Image (cartoon, rainbow, N blue to C red):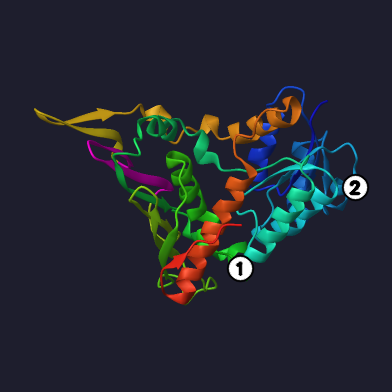
Amino acid sequence: MKIVAAIIGSGIGLQHFKAIQNFKGSKIKYICEKNSQKRNILKRKFPSVQIIESPKKIFKDPKINLVSIASYDNYHYKQVQKCIENKKHFVVEKPLCLSRDELKKIYSSLKKNKKIKMTTNLVLRCNGLFNEFRKKINLKDLFYIEADYIWGRKYKLFEWRSKIKQYSVTLGAAVHMIDLVLWLTNLKPTSVISFGNSKVTQNSKFKKNNLVISMLKFPKNINVKISANAAGIYEHFHEIKVFQKNDTLVNSRLGSFQYNLSKKGSVIKKFKKSLYPDKKNRGRIIQNFIKEILYKKKPSIKIKDQIDLMSICFAIEDSIKLKKEVKIKYL
């Protein structure tokens, strides 16, 4: 068996393209792109690939066994369901979907089609620095985490994100930091209280919250603060501080450190600069997923974990609307 893939969306989809192309023996048959100007560019750039306007051909083609969904967020649900319906494995850009109802339907479809494999492109799990952090976390000593996604790309809010009804910086940005914390701790929160802010963009085309801050309660008496700041003037950055009884792990613009206490005072250990942002490993989620398909390996990200991640995101959205702490309901 060999991978014959199709890409839907040529924005971040081209990163998916590279990850699949770099896996020996894989072939990319289609790139689907709605924009005619972009299609013309793609035809010149990739002459051996069929550049198409509609994904219908992808779902009907029996040779396609992997679909990469990198379209706008509001198309994800229908395209995911089409993949399941047509027995095609798929990787989807976050978010998996835009509502709890859509999530329930996707989960139900997957449970009925257990041979279909899926993954969400949760790239921070493959980051070299955060893998080092994970080795150093001791749940007995861990008591607080701050995880901030500073997007640094305000102009992008006024493109397609301002045109779809359900766009959310929680689903589109904070989801990465939430998943990072779930993966670092192997724990899931029980409740959350969140606040939204639209001050920067309220008089623009983008009427939704451009900042979301959440406080989550985890088991083992651990508290976590997660933020998604889409309007801040800053470099695109994943800032995190992991506070434990005897040390603190930090990724900041000043560098990446481990602070320890000793009898002589504080000791600072620096992590290698090459570990973050670690762009060379961004395709590993997709390449690991291909190995799961071809060699029947255990999933690197369990389907239930991806479903639970979305349940947390929707609880955050509920908390903002209700203006109170809410319990997180998992499917």
Q: Is residue 33 visible?
A: no
Going from N to C along the chain, the mark reached first, 1 or 2, is 2
Q: Residue at x 73, y 55 (%)?
A: 108
Q: Which mark is residue 60?
A: 2
Judge from the rendering whether residue 197 lies leftward or rightward of residue 101; answer left or right.
left
* Magenta segment boundaries in residue numbering: 235-253
Judge from the rendering whether residue 221 lies leftward or rightward of residue 196; answer left or right.
left
Question: Residue 139 occupies which quadrant of the picture?
Answer: top left
Assess whether residue 296 is covered by the magenta stretch.
no
Q: Nearer the viewer, residue 197 or 204?
A: 197
Element type where label 2 sits in the image: helix
Give the residue at mark 1: 166
- Confirm or deny contact between disc 1 and disc 2 (CB under 8 A): no
Question: Residue 227 occupies which quadrant of the picture?
Answer: bottom left
Q: Is the residue 171 above or below the residue 287 in the image?
A: below
Give the amino acid at mark 1. Gln
Q: Residue at x 44, y 71 (%)?
A: 198
Question: Residue 132 occupies which quadrant of the picture?
Answer: top left
